[in-house]
Image (cartoon, coloured by chain):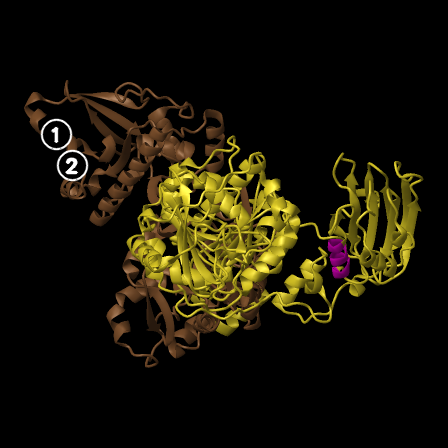
Chain colours: A yellow, B brown
């Protein structure tokens, strides 16, 4: 293109004398030298213009290209493989694949391998006893759920029945027994195993080994069983190798309407199992709730931090109740997951919420405590305008009027410096000791379990001196220490706005839960108007207490306070009893009284200057510690404070639980 | 014969080149109009006004945001400038009575809006609706910098930019996130591998070249070219912020590594000092902001930010830098009114000025004034008892925003050069004993103040 440009431009000027036929013709027509020259220069100019336009075009194109490629440059290396590894879809049109499944059952070890990959292996001593259940996606072979039910212990078979019933039809079920799985395997569970097509399951005996592979609502794909020969020995180890045909993806998926919500549902249901009707094809449970709005909601813009570990089923239940509470704003919720667990993250994504994972630091209690700190700091970073944060845990049910309760009381935290927190939980609020959903208390203990934290308290006091990872402290115990609490109090409701349902936890077991948490009262009435909220402020509360004590009827102190007849069979009265309490930290009598009242007695909770408030037989029941409490002045001189002897032998927590 | 050939060649060349030129002209026009629609809109925009592509794109976008409750406001520098120049006129124009399209019809390739993310309630379905309306949208996401400061958290990515194209006009939606320190932050427009580089000439965008920080603007609703838009209440202030908005994040990862090596001081004294230093810094920032004086973190405070993202607990003072051209005579009075009495004053405005104020709990606030030379900056020092002068040299620098102890403050963008000038290459190693006359590698002695001037240049209180 370039070579034609310069050469012809100069030479034509030299050509003049000899005329070609062409020029003769041209001269005949015009016969003017000037015109000829004019034509020539015109042609040259024209060529020049062409060249210029051409160059401009080239430059322009080049610039456009370089711009595009410059944009390309930054952070090319950034394109890491972030996307989660979706299981390979096997379309119906493709060749039908089979999974090669291996299942092993023995006294001390169980394992399950799918296509050569071990998906379960448990040979730890002293744990993992019972029936291990694995659910596979029938189209992908993806492990959707992994559970172990210790059916040697009571009630675990009920949990297994519940779980197996929730599994969607068509899924591949794998069961294998480790150690012992029959002792508390009751008829309902056996009938269910029979309905799945199992031969040996319903007849499972003491220390038998057993493996089972089958499709829910479909054929059995393999089963092996070995009877234990004697009471003191186990059945022989059994190993089952079987082929599981995969079905097409279309068969495995439901046909829900194509909405944003159902897209989340589909993603969730193709990955995990054991969440019941949320994945039902015909009539799936809603995952959006749109509860009523609260008029004049003061906590609409308060961030909610949900502290979670790896208990996705709990988290699911918790988030359902939270998202159903009136006045909730989902975009203010952040779920903080302690560890890189996928399933809790899937639950969070199902509800379309924000989830944050936390690399575990330290161990046990310190790990929880570090997780709390990171979560609280992150919450205030994400919502820098917030003055408060609501802190929840994954094993709580949230009352329908949780936010209404907070909206009505949160101004106290702003106006009263002597407050430490507002909590939705009353440690002493059991079915038989709590009555009035409109009533609030001030207490010197920090109950946690659904509470509001003031930003200034966290940023200025707690965060800088939060226990470091090497200190194995419970964060809540630390927060309750006098150095942190500094005489401040918490506001709690008489009837709790949260319910602690967690049985599996760091400091938790079934027995403990049954004794201390199961019978807790939980408000289910929507839109409760709290009574006289401003009387909870420091000085007003003292006035209120004095008024209460003045009108309270003094109980008959000669009776045994543990007897039911200690309180008369009335309703709506206020009664007061005086117990011995020598010093501010003398809780001997109170602990005994709490024990026989079947309320929290593991440490002292719910007191306000030596006063406890609860309900008995629908009467308000006040307990004053004499002489340590300033309210001792209300004691008539004739009354001798009750003294209860502690039991001679030191009894720990389980002993206390046994009494109940 | 050769002559004939030459002429014939010339004629033939003219012919081919004219054909070629015609083709090129056609192609060039086509190329231009496809690229930014100038060829089309220029002629139409001036005559018919409300028919231009950009006006229609903006209108559609505003319809979309108001129907979906997307909290956006206009931040386009060009349009805001036009608006601020014609502000009276806009206020007087009642809704709908606009006769001429003046603002949104200026030929542009894109219009920039900001999105207040924390007010946005329905993020999920928005994209789809935009696409149904004919927009082609691109979403640029990244990890959340607000989680960077905290050990080992990883969360869902947050959106940073949306670019939505309608015909030849694009809407650049910059996502503004709330940060601790009462300011708004937007992210870097960084193209990841899977993004189509040809989607838009990204280089031309005014926002996103760097992350940016802005004061949270108050907003107002105005009607411009018949469209209801929200704009900053003080567009001039917002426009002034744009060129200085570049934001740099603290190096949290390196800070964590540093603290792992040297361990943080968590004693009660360290905590008390940090708390009072933070309060002093907040008070100083507030006072200087009121005066409209720019400042940056200097010396030990800057080192603390850069090295450990926190106040160095044994540093005993707070150090700030101010350009001497920003000096105002009422600085001393303003600080005194804020409860910070002058402790000493060294030098004079023309030479080596340094102010020191007494804060609470024995924490001192040092303000160094920086003088600019052709190839470097310097600030001065004075030894009270001998009248000796010192000079501290720094390479030239510009100012960037950053977040430090829950505040938005300036630091030198070229931080590493600044710190290495002041503390040498070994700044990473904590040193508790520091002699300001000998330790800094950039110190030079600068003679002695003449005794006649001592009363003026050495004032101790």
Q: Position of residue A179 (x, y in %)?
A: 82, 40
Label 1 near label 2: C-beta < 8 Å?
Answer: yes
Query: What residue do we see at 50% from left, 55% from top?
Result: A429
| Mark 1 crowd level (few <14, some 14–19, many ≥20, 10 Å Cα) | few
* Residue B195 highlighted magenta (yes or no): no
> Of A398 and A101, which appears nearest the observer?
A398
Residue B354 against residue B410 in the figure, above or below = above
Query: What residue do we see at 78% from left, 50% from top?
Result: A134
Task: Give the quarter of the image for residue B217.
Answer: bottom left
Observer able to see residue B18:
no
How far is disc 2 from disc 1 in space, using C-alphas? 9 Å
Q: Main secondary structure of the magenta part?
A: helix
**Mark 2 lies on residue:** B341
The circle on residue B461 is: 1
> Of B438 and B31, which appears nearest the observer?
B438
Q: Position of residue A601 (x, y in %)?
A: 52, 45
- Quadrant in which the N terminus of chain A is drawn: bottom right
Dot 1 lies on which element?
A: loop
Magenta stretch bounds: A158-166
| B283 sits to left or right of B221 | left
| A10 sits to left or right of A111 | left
Dot 2 lies on which element?
A: loop
Q: How many marks?
A: 2
Q: Position of residue A623 (x, y in %)?
A: 42, 51
Chain that bears disc 1? B
Tags 2 and 1 both on a single chain: yes
């Amino acid at each position: 293109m370039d070579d034609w440009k310069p050469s012809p431009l100069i030479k034509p000027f030299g050509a003049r004398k000899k005329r070609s036929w062409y020029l003769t013709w041209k001269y005949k027509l015009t016969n003017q030298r000037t015109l000829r020259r004019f034509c020539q220069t015109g042609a040259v100019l024209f060529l020049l213009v062409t060249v210029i336009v051409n160059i401009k075009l080239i430059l322009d194109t080049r610039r456009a290209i370089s711009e595009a490629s410059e944009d390309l440059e930054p952070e090319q290396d950034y394109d890491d493989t972030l996307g989660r590894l979706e299981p390979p879809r096997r379309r119906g049109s493709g060749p039908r694949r089979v999974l090669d499944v291996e299942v092993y059952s023995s006294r001390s070890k169980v394992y399950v391998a799918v296509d050569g990959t071990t998906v379960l292996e448990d040979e730890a001593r002293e744990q993992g006893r019972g029936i291990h259940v694995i659910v596979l996606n029938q189209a992908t072979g993806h492990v959707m759920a992994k559970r172990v039910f210790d059916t040697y212990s009571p009630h675990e078979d009920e949990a297994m029945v519940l779980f197996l019933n929730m599994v969607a039809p068509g899924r591949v079920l794998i069961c294998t027994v480790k150690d012992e799985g029959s002792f508390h395997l009751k008829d309902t569970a056996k009938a269910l195993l029979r309905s799945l097509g199992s031969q040996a399951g319903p007849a499972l005996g003491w220390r038998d080994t057993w493996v089972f592979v089958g499709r829910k609502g479909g054929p059995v794909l393999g089963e092996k069983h070995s009877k234990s020969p004697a009471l003191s020995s186990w059945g022989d180890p059994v190993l089952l190798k079987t082929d599981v045909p995969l079905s097409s993806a279309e068969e495995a998926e439901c046909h829900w309407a194509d909405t944003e919500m159902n897209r989340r549902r589909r993603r969730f249901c193709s990955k995990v199992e054991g969440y019941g009707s949320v994945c039902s094809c015909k009539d799936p449970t809603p995952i959006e709730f749109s509860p009523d709005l609260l008029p004049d909601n003061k906590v609409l813009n308060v961030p909610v931090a949900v502290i979670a570990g790896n208990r996705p089923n709990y988290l699911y239940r918790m988030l359902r109740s939270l998202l159903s509470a009136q006045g909730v704003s989902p975009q203010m919720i952040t779920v903080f997951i302690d560890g890189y667990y996928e399933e809790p993250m899937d639950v969070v994504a199902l509800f379309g919420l924000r989830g944050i994972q936390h690399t575990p630091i330290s161990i046990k209690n310190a790990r929880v405590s570090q997780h709390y700190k990171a979560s609280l700091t992150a919450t205030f970073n994400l919502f820098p305008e917030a003055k408060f944060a609501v802190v929840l845990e994954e094993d709580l049910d949230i009352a329908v009027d949780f936010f209404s309760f907070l909206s009505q009381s949160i101004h106290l935290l702003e106006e009263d410096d002597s407050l430490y927190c507002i909590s939705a939980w009353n440690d002493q609020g059991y079915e038989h000791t709590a009555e009035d959903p409109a009533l609030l208390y001030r207490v010197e203990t920090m109950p946690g379990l659904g509470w509001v934290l003031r930003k200034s308290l966290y940023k200025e006091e707690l965060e800088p001196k939060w226990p470091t990872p090497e200190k194995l402290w419970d964060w809540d115990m630390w927060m309750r220490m006098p150095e942190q609490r500094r005489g401040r109090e918490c506001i709690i409701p008489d009837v709790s706005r949260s319910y602690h349902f967690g049985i599996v936890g760091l400091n938790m077991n079934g027995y403990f839960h049954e004794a201390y948490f199961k019978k807790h009262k939980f408000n289910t009435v929507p839109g409760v108007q709290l009574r006289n909220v401003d009387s909870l402020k420091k000085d007003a509360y003292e006035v209120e207490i004095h008024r209460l004590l003045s009108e309270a009827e003094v109980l008959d102190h000669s009776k045994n306070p543990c007897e039911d007849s200690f309180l008369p069979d009335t309703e709506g009265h206020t009664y007061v009893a005086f117990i011995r309490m020598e010093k501010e930290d003398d809780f001997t009598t109170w602990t005994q009284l709490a024990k026989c009242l079947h309320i929290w007695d593991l440490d002292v909770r719910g007191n306000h200057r030596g006063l406890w408030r609860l309900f008995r037989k629908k009467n308000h029941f006040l307990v004053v510690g004499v002489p340590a409490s300033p309210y001792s002045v209300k004691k008539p001189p004739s009354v001798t404070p009750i003294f209860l002897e502690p039991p001679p032998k030191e009894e720990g927590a389980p002993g206390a639980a046994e009494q109940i | 014969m050769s002559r004939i050939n030459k002429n014939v060649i010339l004629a033939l060349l003219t012919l081919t080149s004219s054909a070629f030129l015609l083709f090129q002209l056609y192609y060039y026009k086509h190329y231009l109009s496809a690229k930014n629609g100038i060829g089309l809109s220029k002629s139409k925009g001036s005559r018919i006004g409300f028919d231009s592509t950009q006006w229609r794109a903006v209108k559609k976008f505003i319809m979309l945001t108001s129907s979906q409750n997307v909290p956006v406001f206009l931040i386009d520098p060009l349009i805001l400038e036009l608006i601020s120049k014609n502000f009276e006129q806009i206020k007087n124009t009642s809704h709908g009575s606009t006769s001429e399209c003046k603002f949104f019809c200026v030929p542009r390739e894109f219009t920039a809006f900001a999105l207040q993310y924390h007010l946005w309630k329905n993020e999920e379905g928005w994209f789809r609706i935009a696409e149904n309306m004919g927009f082609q949208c691109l979403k640029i996401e990244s990890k959340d910098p607000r989680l960077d400061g905290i050990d080992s958290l990883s969360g869902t990515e947050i959106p940073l930019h949306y670019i939505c194209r309608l015909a030849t006009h694009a809407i650049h939606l910059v996502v503004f996130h709330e940060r601790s320190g009462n300011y708004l932050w937007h992210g870097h427009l960084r193209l990841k591998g899977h993004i189509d580089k040809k989607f838009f000439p990204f280089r031309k965008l005014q926002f996103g070249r760097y992350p940016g920080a802005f004061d949270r603007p108050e907003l107002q609703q105005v009607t411009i070219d018949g469209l209801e838009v929200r704009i900053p209440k003080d567009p001039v202030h917002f426009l002034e912020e744009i060129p200085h908005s570049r934001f740099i994040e603290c190096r949290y990862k390196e800070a964590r590594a540093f603290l792992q090596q040297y361990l943080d001081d968590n004693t009660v004294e360290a905590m008390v000092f940090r708390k009072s230093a933070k309060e002093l810094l907040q008070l100083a920032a507030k006072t200087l902001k009121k005066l409209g004086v720019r400042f940056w973190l200097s010396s030990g405070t800057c080192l603390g930010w850069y090295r450990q993202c926190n106040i160095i607990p044994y540093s005993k003072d707070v150090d700030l830098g101010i350009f001497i051209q920003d000096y105002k005579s009422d600085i001393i009075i303003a600080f005194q009114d804020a409860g910070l009495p002058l402790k000493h004053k060294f030098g004079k405005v023309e030479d080596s000025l340094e102010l020191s104020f007494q804060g609470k709990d024995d924490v001192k606030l040092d303000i160094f004034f920086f003088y600019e030379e052709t190839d470097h900056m310097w600030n001065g020092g004075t030894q009270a008892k001998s009248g000796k002068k010192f000079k501290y040299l720094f390479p030239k620098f510009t100012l960037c925003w950053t977040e430090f102890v829950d505040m938005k403050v300036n630091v030198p963008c070229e931080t590493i050069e600044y710190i290495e000038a002041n503390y040498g290459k070994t700044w990473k190693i904590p040193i508790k004993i520091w002699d300001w006359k000998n330790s800094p590698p950039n110190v030079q002695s600068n003679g002695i103040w003449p005794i006649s001037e001592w009363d003026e240049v050495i004032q101790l209180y």
